[in-house]
Each structure stands twice: as C-alpha cells, then as structure tokens.
C-alpha cells in the first residue's frame, strides 16, 4: 500500500439522534468530528441509524444532527447510509443532500456503487454498479443499505424470508467481487459499507448473535472482495481480519457513538481506517461516552451494603442503575428516599425493583387422592393439622346437610356460653380450633360437591 493511494477514513455509526438520546449523541459525535478533523481524514462514512426514529426538521435533535454533519462536510466528503427502517424511515436522510457544505454529502439509500474522485467529488454509478470505473478515482465505495425485511417477505413469502435474506445477500456480495478486483488492479482502494447483523457477532450486552435470519456471515462479506467492510447496526466495536492473495482485508463494526443503555460493554467511539488497494486496518478512537454503574441486590436493598459498593467504585457523575427483588409483602419496606440520598452525586439514577408475587399452590397430592378422607389427610399434612377430628366431621357430613350441622353447632355454642365463661382459656381455645377445622372441612366438602 502506498501513501499516495491510501485513504484515511473516519467511520461513524449508530448516532441515534433523538429527544431521549440527544445529549449523549451530540456530545460524543461532536468530539468524534473534532478528532477526525484533527487527524486529517480524507472522507467520512456514517454507516446507518443516524437518527433514533423519524424526526421533525425543526426539532432540536434534527437541528443538532444537521449542524454536526455540516461541520463534517466542511472538512471532507461525507457518505451517509440508510440504516434500519424503524430508526430511519425512508426519506429521513434526503435533506442532507442539500446541506451545502464545502464538500458534498452522498446519501446511499439504495444498493449501488459510488466513486470518490481525487478532487473530492462523488461519482454515482448509473445502475447498481460500475461496468467500467471512471477516471481519477481515489476510492470505490459499494453501498448496501439496511435490508427491508418486509420487501423480502413479500417476494419470498414469510416462511422463507428469514433464511432467504442471507442467501440473496450472499449472492449479491459474490457478484461484487469482479468490480472490486478491477479497482484493485487500477490501484483504487475498495470499501463496502452496509448495515446489518453478522452471524456470530457479539452485541453490546455480550450476547452472541447466532441464528439463520441474519444478513451476513464473515465468509459472505469477504467473498465481496473489498479491502474494507464498514458496518453499522451492532453497538459494540469488533472486527475480523483475513490475509490472503489479495492482501489484508478487514471487516469492522464501529459500534454506537455513545452509550445509550445500561449494561453496554466496551469502549464507545468511531473508527479511523487506513485503506489502500491491497490492505486495510482500523483502530477505535474513544468518545467521552457516559459512564454507567450497575448495582444489584438479590433481595431487599441493604443500605450498608450499598454504601460499601459505592465506596468501592466511583459513581460521581455516572449513571447508576440499582436493581433488587423483594416479595410482594415487603415492597413498601424499600427506602427509596435513603437510596436517592446516597446516590446524590450521580448524573442519573434508575431504580428497577422486581416484585415477586405471592404464589399459592394446592396441597401436594390432593388431586391424586381418590376418597374424600384421603384428600382431607393430604390437606391436613400441608397445613399441619391433625386429620382425625376432621374424619368425624366427614362422617357427620355424610349423614346431615351442612346447614343442619352449622345450626346445631351454633345452638350448642349459645347453650354453653355461660359454662365457657367459667372454663380455663386454654380449653375454650381448643374448642374454637376444632370448630375452625370443621368449618374448613365444610368448605372442602362444598367445593368437592360443586
């Protein structure tokens, strides 16, 4: 790779400008742009999801993003790729074509190739790819925006859409190899810019993406024959390299520009690429992403343990998430005010309390018991009662109606009221316990008859 033919590329991705994310996105993207200008990049690429959702042009988020991209376009040519349709509905990026910076902004919202000239201009292919490369190219960019799964499902059917997406993308990537080989022979660096999921990549929450419904594999991306593959969509930086007969090639996610959620692992930033016709390499330039601290309790938060945890790790200026789980009857015992006071120095506090509902189950084995006497014995074993008095109740139930039994019991209580007043308290309590058990027995019997 010669210095003359090499291109220094700033690769940004997943800016996610929106009302909720504006402060984090704008602080980090602004710092990244200033760093890119400082090192003197030749071209900038934003590989999708510049916005978090559709934005009104007069909204603070849209105005901030336009201002940042204009600052970038005043330094170097900019390529913006269409990202996930839910984040960037079609047409969201169209305004950037008219930005009017010192250099042009090319918006890639369809599959195609675009060349960057030595004069810093964009030359767009008339079809989806160049049949012959224009003269004076400094780099060749192949753009593959985020795949519209709905369109794939409409064409292939919902059942075949998942696996069919990867197969069709792999066929397309193989078809790009001849144009990349042609550019390589002319000494022109080749870059593939896309937005999607690579099978086996790791998310920002350390989850491997394994499945058959992802757009790419590393093999299909290398089959395209580009020296550098600049990817968006996954918020964690990672890369894959291959050295073979056409030089060193590299696939890399830039990751998100900032830390938008708790639990995101790894540094946040953008990639500085050095790409030539026969080699590619990148390195992560970190941005001032916010710090997050996660503290979890298995049960009710312990204030002493929380103080110890906060003393063990700096939390001043960080975003703190505190998690706990408590039984439903203890939900009001959590002292939120005291925890907020301990976390007064944090930039933001997020409480996530999980309430464990009370679960009531039937007596074990009662469903398998055949006779009512056996059911009562199973119930008594669970609640810790003696079954013998209840068996006498069952015999009485077999001979009389429940209402007759209750009337007789009440009459007996009224007749014995004066006697009970002179009896020891322990004996009265014992009789009341037996009556309580008899009432439970009646409920069991009534439920069984019902």
Image: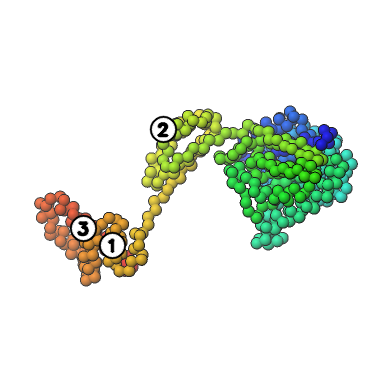
Q: CA distance from mark 3 to mark 2?
A: 47 Å
Q: Earlier in the sequence, mark 3 or mark 2?
A: 2
Q: Secondary structure at mark 2?
A: helix
324 over 403 or under it: above or below? above
Q: Earlier in the sequence, mark 2 or mark 1?
A: 2
Q: How far apart are labels 2 and 1 at the CA level?
A: 47 Å
Question: Residue 189 bears which disc, if any?
Answer: none
**At x 80% / y 49%, what residue is drawn?**
177
The colour scheme used here is rainbow
| Position of residue 306 measured from the top left corner of the image (x, y, whole percent) | 45, 34
Q: Residue at x 64, y 42 (%)?
A: 235
Q: Is residue 168 visible?
A: yes
Q: In this image, 230 relative to 182: left or right?
A: left
Q: Which residue is mark 1?
A: 377
For residue 125, say whether it is visible.
no
| Secondary structure state at the residue bearing disc 1 | helix
Q: Which residue is mark 2?
A: 304
The residue lying at 75 percent from left, 43 percent from top is 243
Give the distance between the C-alpha atoms of the residues marked 3 and 1, in whole angstroms.
Answer: 15 Å
Q: Are there few (<14), some (14-19), or many (20+) residues within 10 Å of tag 1? A: some
257 left or right, relative to 338: right
Secondary structure of the residue carrying numbered label 3: helix
Residue annotated with mark 3? 434
Q: Quadrant of residue 266?
A: top right
């Amino acid at each position: 790779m010669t210095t003359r033919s090499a291109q220094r590329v700033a690769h940004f991705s997943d800016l996610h400008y929106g009302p909720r994310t504006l402060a984090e996105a704008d602080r980090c993207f602004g710092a990244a742009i200033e760093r890119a200008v400082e090192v003197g990049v030749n071209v900038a690429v934003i590989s999708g999801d510049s916005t978090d959702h559709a934005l009104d042009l007069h909204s603070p988020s849209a105005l901030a993003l336009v201002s940042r991209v204009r600052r970038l376009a005043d330094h170097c040519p900019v390529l913006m790729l269409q990202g996930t349709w839910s984040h960037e509905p079609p047409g969201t990026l169209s305004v950037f074509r008219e930005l009017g910076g010192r250099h042009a902004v090319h918006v890639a919202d369809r599959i195609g190739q675009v060349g960057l000239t030595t004069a810093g201009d964009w030359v767009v292919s008339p079809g989806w790819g160049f049949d012959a490369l224009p003269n004076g190219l400094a780099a060749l960019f192949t753009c593959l925006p985020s795949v519209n799964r709905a369109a794939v499902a409409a064409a292939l059917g919902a059942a075949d859409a998942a696996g069919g997406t990867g197969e069709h993308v792999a066929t397309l990537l193989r078809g790009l190899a001849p144009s990349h080989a042609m550019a390589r022979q002319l000494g022109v660096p080749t870059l593939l810019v896309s937005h999607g999921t690579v099978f086996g990549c790791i998310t920002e929450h350390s989850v491997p993406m394994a499945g058959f419904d992802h757009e790419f594999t590393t093999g299909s991306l290398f089959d395209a024959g580009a020296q550098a593959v600049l990817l968006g969509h996954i918020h964690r930086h990672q890369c894959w390299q291959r050295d073979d007969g056409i030089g060193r090639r590299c696939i890399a996610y830039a990751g998100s520009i900032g830390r938008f959620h708790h639990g995101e692992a790894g540094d946040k930033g953008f990639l500085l690429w050095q790409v030539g016709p026969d080699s590619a390499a990148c390195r992560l330039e970190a941005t001032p992403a916010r710090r997050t601290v996660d503290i979890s309790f298995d049960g009710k938060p312990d204030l002493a343990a929380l103080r110890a945890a906060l003393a063990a790790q700096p939390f001043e200026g960080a975003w703190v998430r505190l998690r706990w789980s408590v039984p439903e009857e203890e939900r009001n015992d959590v002292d939120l005010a005291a925890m907020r006071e301990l976390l007064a120095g944090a930039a933001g506090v997020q409480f996530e309390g999980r309430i464990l509902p009370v679960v009531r189950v039937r007596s074990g084995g009662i469903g398998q018991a055949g006779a009512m006497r056996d059911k009562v014995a199973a119930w008594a074993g669970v609640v810790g009662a003696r079954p013998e008095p209840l068996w006498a109740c069952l015999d009485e139930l077999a001979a009389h109606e429940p209402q007759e039994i209750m009337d007789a019991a009440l009459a007996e209580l009224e007749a014995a009221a004066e006697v009970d007043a002179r009896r020891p308290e322990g004996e009265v309590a014992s009789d009341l316990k037996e009556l309580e058990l008899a009432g439970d027995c009646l409920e069991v019997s009534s439920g069984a008859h019902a």
